[in-house]
Image (spheres, rainbow, N blue to C red):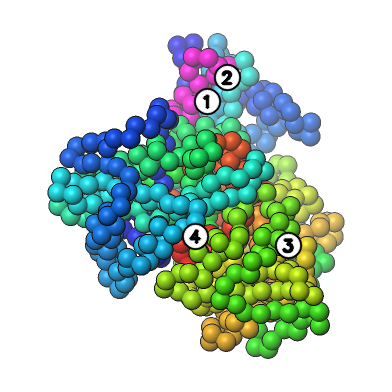
Amino acid sequence: MNSGTGGFDSHALPPFHSSSKARPDGPRASLDLIVRPYEPGDEAAILRAHNQVFAHVDPTQPAKSLALWRWQFARNPAGSRIVIALDDEGRVQGQYAGLRQRVHSEVGAVHFTQSVDSMHTRSTSPGLARASAFVRAGEEYARRFCGAEPELDQVMFGLAIPSAWRVGSRRLGYEHLRTISVLAAPVLAAAEEIGGNWSVESADRCPDDVAELFSTLVPDRSLIGVRDAETMNWRFAEHPEHRYLFGVVRERGRLRALGVFRRGSFAGLEGGLVCDWLAPAADEDAQRALAAWFGARTRESGAAQWIALFPDTAPEWLAFQRRGFRLFPTEYILATRSFRAPFDRDYLFWRWFYTLGDTDLV
Amino acid sequence: MDDFEIRALRPGDEHSLLATFNLVFAAGNPGFTPRTIEEWRWAFERNPAGQRVFVALHRGEVVAQYAALPQQVWVDGNRHVFAQIVDSMVHPAHRAHGDRPSLFLETARAFFAEYGGPDKDWVHYGWPIGRALSLGEKHLEYGTLRTQLVLLRELDAQRSGSAPSRSIEIAQLSRFDHRAKWLWDRCADSLRASAIRDAAYLNWRFADHPRQRYAMHAARDESGNLLGLCVARPADLVQKDLWCIAEWLVPPGELELAQALLETTTEAARQAGARAIAWICPEWSDWHRWFQDQGFLAHPTPYRTVARAFQRRFDLHWLRSSWWYQWGDSDLV
């Protein structure tokens, strides 16, 4: 996964394109580029281009491995989308890619897609053609994969760095959903106590009864990515490069809260990352127990602080500040593009719940 | 647009402009108090940074306005003008429908052409809502600078800060003199790009405001020089019964002084019957962090701070990380 320091545009969104929704299957030629969806066997060329682009921006960043690519794009239980732009020698000149996510909403189950690894190469092509490779891949992506119909993706999102935002807002129809701030707090020196009927355990895999916990969260969250065991295990337990820990909070055996921890960094802050946090907003005991577990894991990891990302409209935003967390600005803009009602910008701003784990940044 | 004359405001337009303003802004707003000519003159004739008003006239009547309140802002060692877009409006009888061109957009475009540019105003900004935001984003190059948070502390909340100093005398001011600029000079570097807080600006903005009364608390040394300033007033903004800090001007690192000023304005808030104290400032500021340490929590608001930048190098990203503004830089408080 990249850390958001990508090349031309690491978290791009495609342009607004209101024309026909017809989806012919054949490739589309533009200038000297062939723009088409991913086909099996493309991954080697995609990775070559990806590693060239991202090494140019950040030479210290390790090359993306085939194992990571396969995990991310081939094994995501919700699926993935890729459109590439190839030159006449079959080299990938641009890519627009997204990770799908099943989302619970007030209008039923829908799909969002997170734009990741969007890029264009910095090879011999002139500037306009380079931009075209990216933009045209994005246009084709939106035309094929996004729309109001149930089989398509209804909302696209990404955490855009400034360069990505500049291009996206001028040329690609990004909407600024939110200016991203992160919450961080020093970890307490001593462990917090939890009640006698409670147990908090660390696990390498997600408990199967997460679906029951998720159903208790839904009344508080009108728009939230589905947390089931399959998705959580793919996202965290089966990650080929990072090790995550699940914090499993039970009261008399019943799952009351679930968190995901790893040591890492986000937006220049280093510490214990709250990669996911699932606790009913009114269940203060469960929140306290989960917070104690995060504090212990953070301390154990040697980190001095723990770090969380929530929408400022979520109950956790204020609850964490009351717990001693402070807000730190980041350079990220949460960019979205909606393809159906009611998911306009205001709706997403006030209702959509997400955590760091909903992004590819941790 | 042949039936309309779009141009800069001229003397004599103001009464017609005000009549249209009071008609437009009263609609759907039962609590609306009509603006007086004195209030209008304060805002648009006496602003020490000048006037930015474009109007559209139909048969001699002002039927649309696109206007701004300019400020002198210190950027990169020079004075430049930033201007807050306010009071944009179109008379209901002349609003766009069908194929008719939008008088709002035509007036706005004429305004931007006249005032915005690398050699003119560098930034036009504001907090538009609803349709103005949507039109501005679509047609007028408005961009979101940030989704605006507000720092808010309930008056009965426990605070983590230290006890206020009793050795610092805080007094209520009625006006500012040349020494106000000296205080801003001490703060300016830490504020990155900020409106110049001199006596002309502060007196116009707060002391001479024709409708609002501000509590202007300051610490002074034995010679009467200003050491720190906090200007606030009650307001129903974002939430009801808030005590909104409009202006906070304290040199960096003067934490004991800051504590004393915050305590004083907190006491004034209590006496005014406020439920909570609220303030906005950029998140990059050390003061943002300090207010959080005093028990202020960052809450979301429906506001977007929106801007259009005319100087390529000083774009929205730069503004987000460098422009210091508070409620006093808006017409909201």
Q: Which mark is residue A359?
A: 4
| x and y percentages locating residue B61 in the rendered image | 58, 16
Is residue A175 inside the magenta stretch? no
The residue type indicated by label 1 comes to Phe
- The mark closer to the camera, 4 or 1, is 4
The residue type indicated by label 2 comes to Arg
User: Does the rendering let one see residue A42?
Assistant: yes
| x and y percentages locating residue B321 in the rendered image | 46, 59
Q: Secondary structure at mark 3?
A: loop
Q: Which residue is mark 1?
A: B104
Badge 1: chain ID: B
Q: Nearer the viewer, residue B216 or B28?
A: B28
Badge 4: chain ID: A
Tag 3 near tag 4, CB within 8 Å: no
Q: Nearer the viewer, residue A168 or B264?
A: A168
Left or right of A145? Residue B157 is right
**Pointer 3 local density, CA inside 10 Å: few below 14, some 14–19, many at least 20:** many
- The mark closer to the camera, 2 or 3, is 3
**Pointer 4 local density, CA inside 10 Å: few below 14, some 14–19, many at least 20:** some
